[in-house]
Structures are given as C-alpha cells and as structure tokens.
Image (cartoon, rainbow, N blue to C red):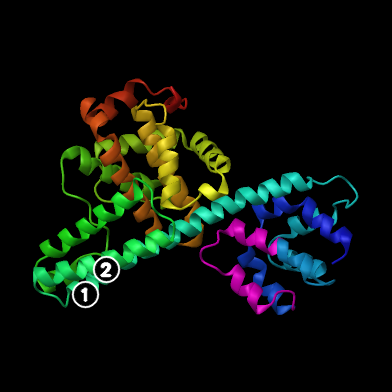
Amino acid sequence: MEEADKRKLRINFIFLVDNVRVGDIRDYLYSEGVLTEDDMEKLSLMTLTERDKTRTLLLILPKRGSKAFRVFLEALNECSYPFAAEKIQSTDPHVADTGPDEIDTFIQEEEKFSRLHQQILMQTELILGFKKEVDDLRLQLRSSEEQSAMLKKHYTHLERQMMECGLTGDHVVPYLKDFAVRVEQDTVDSGSVEMRKKMPGALVRPHGDKTTQLAYEIAADITAYIALHTTQGQTTKYTKTMRKVVDQLSDTYNDQFTELIKKLDIRQINGLQTICAVAEGLFADGTNNWGRIVTLYAFGGFVAKQALESNVADLADVIADFIGFYVSKTLKPWIDSNNGWVMTLWFFAYNFNGTPFYCH
C-alpha cells in the first residue's frame, strides 16, 4: 500500500472504528483477494467486539498489497458506507494526523476492553461448562453419594483451570466454591430424573435471608436490563427503583466506567478479578452508601453490554451472579445495619438529584 494511503487510513482510524462494521465488508474484501482465510478466521472470532474487528482490519490492510486501499474504498461504497469512503478520499495525507501517541493510546484502551471481554468469556465457559457437566452426569447418578463424589471431582478440575487462568483473588476463589455448593445443593434437591430433565439451565441462586436473595435478584435484573434490554424474573419495587436510577444516570455511568477501565494497567485485567478490583475501588475509602452499590450493579451491566457485541448472552448471567455474591458477602453487614434494602426506596426517592451521588 502506498504511504499516502496508509496515512489516510491512519488519520481516519478512530472514525472508521466508530462507524464501520467489519461484518458488512469482510466478504467483499475476501472475494477480491485482499483478505486471506486466516484473516477471515481472525475477523470472525466471537470473542471480538465489532470495534475490535474493525481495528484489527485496519491494522491488516496496509500489509495486503497495493490494491488493498482501492478495494477497501470499493467495499465501503458497495456496502452502505459511501460517507466513509468519501471522507477517506477527501483526506489530505500531508496534514498532521491524530499522531502516533493518540492512536497508540486508543489501541491500548481498545485492547483493555478486548482482553477483559475475552477473559470473562473464557471464565464464563469454564463455569457454565462445569454446571453443564454436573447437570448431564446427575441424570445418570441416582444416589446422593455418587453425586457428591462426582461433584468434588469436577470442582477440583474447575479450580485447577481457574488457577491456570490466574484467578486467585480474595473474592473470586470463594465465589467458585460458593457456586459449586449451590450446584451440589441443586443436585441433591432436584428430585427425580424426570423432574431434573425439565429444570432450566439457569444459575442457581442461593438460599438465605432477604438481604442475600435481593442482592442476587437485583444483580440479575439490572445486568439483564442494561445488557439485554430485558429482565430476570418478576419485577419488584426494588428492581423498579434501581432501573429508574440507572436510566437517569446511564450517560454518566458509561463515561465513568470507560474511564475506570482505561485507568487499569493491562496487567491488572483478568476477567472477574477486574470486576472485583473495580468493586474494591468503589469502596476503598471505607464509605458505603446506596449510590455506590447501585453503581456496582450498573458496572456489571455495562461490562456485559460491551461484551454482548459478540453475542455471548450467558456472560451476563455469570457477571450478575458474581456481583450478587460480592454484594451479599461483602456489603451485607452494612445493608443490614442500615435497615435493609427497603432503605433504597427512601434513599433514591428523597436524595436523588440527578448527580453522580455515589461520589458523595
């Protein structure tokens, strides 16, 4: 590719990442011989967001010969992006571009989101794979002794896999153990083989007092509400209140959550452990309040929504389950000492003023 054409792509890099979906032009580029089979496979990965795919394509194109630029413009014109083609063509390659530092920073930030999504996806597959194995095997095992022995064996395997992924955090490991206990309880309590076959594959919520149950219920509802534009289970006065707060602060949340991820060193990003690190940061000064708690729930929905560009719906369930666990174990004493979840109704009704109150 000509140096001038490379500069045009570089100058418009951020614009193209924001406005072009690779899925719309990928086949055209492949049919014209610009992309290889390996390129197509790389750009089809389900773990990549649409922005990841566009960024990856823009880094590939300069390496694909002299006709790559021309064919790329043709693809944009043919596939509903004539405005993008026109913008690139009208760009003066001799003017100052956005600068290598800015683009490198942009790429690093995108890599952080990509890494976070890929790691949570991998961890989700491990966790749900563990539950599926148990669900499948328990249909064959009738005695509680057989089920218990089988569960311990599979949990040991899950624990080893998670450790290999670097998941050794103070909250993540207890979460895995708690999850395994819930699966075991579900196995023992699920009744006959016929009844087990009818049971849905959803994650099993823990038994416990109202504070614990609502911690999980609100987490599931808010994550699904933000990420999937739907809800989990029956709507309650608590989930309705939380949704109203999230709706009114959605723009503020999105900007602040993006900044939270940007500030993390890429070495700190490790799926569920990253969510835990953000949670610890929210409460690092020892001050708890309802605003910070709803912020944590909203952050889970934000992460799931970004990753769902890859069509991974199960990921939202695991994120919600983990945040429900974190709130029920870490913040339960504060919630109970402040008259329980019922206080959210009063707090947000009389103290909400449209500002990021969790910073107060």
- Which residue occupies the foreground of this view, 70 or 335? 335
Q: Residue 97 got which mark?
A: none
Q: Residue 106 in the image: x percent, y percent?
A: 67, 47
Q: Is residue 54 left or right of residue 118?
A: right
Where is mark 1, residue-wise? 137
Amino acid type, residue under disc 2 in the picture: His
Residue drawn 81% across the image and 66% down it? 69
Picture layout, residue 213 above or below residue 75: above
- Residue 313 visible in the snapshot: no
- Which residue occupies the foreground of this view, 101 or 155? 155
Picture layout, residue 324 above or below residue 63: above
Picture layout, residue 261 above or below residue 178: above
- Which residue occupies the foreground of this view, 108 or 26? 108
Residue drawn 50% across the image and 61% down it? 310
Amino acid type, residue under disc 1 in the picture: Leu
Location of the N terminus (image quadrant): bottom right
Name the quadrant containing residue 75: bottom right
Of tags 2 and 1, the one toward the viewer is 2
Where is mark 2, residue-wise? 154
Q: Residue 108 in the image: x percent, y percent?
A: 64, 50
Find out whether residue 14 is within the magenta segment: no
Pointer 2 or 1: first along the chain: 1
Residue drawn 58% across the image and 59% down it? 50
Residues in magenta?
33-58
Find out whether residue 36 is within the magenta segment: yes
Q: Secondary structure at mark 1?
A: helix
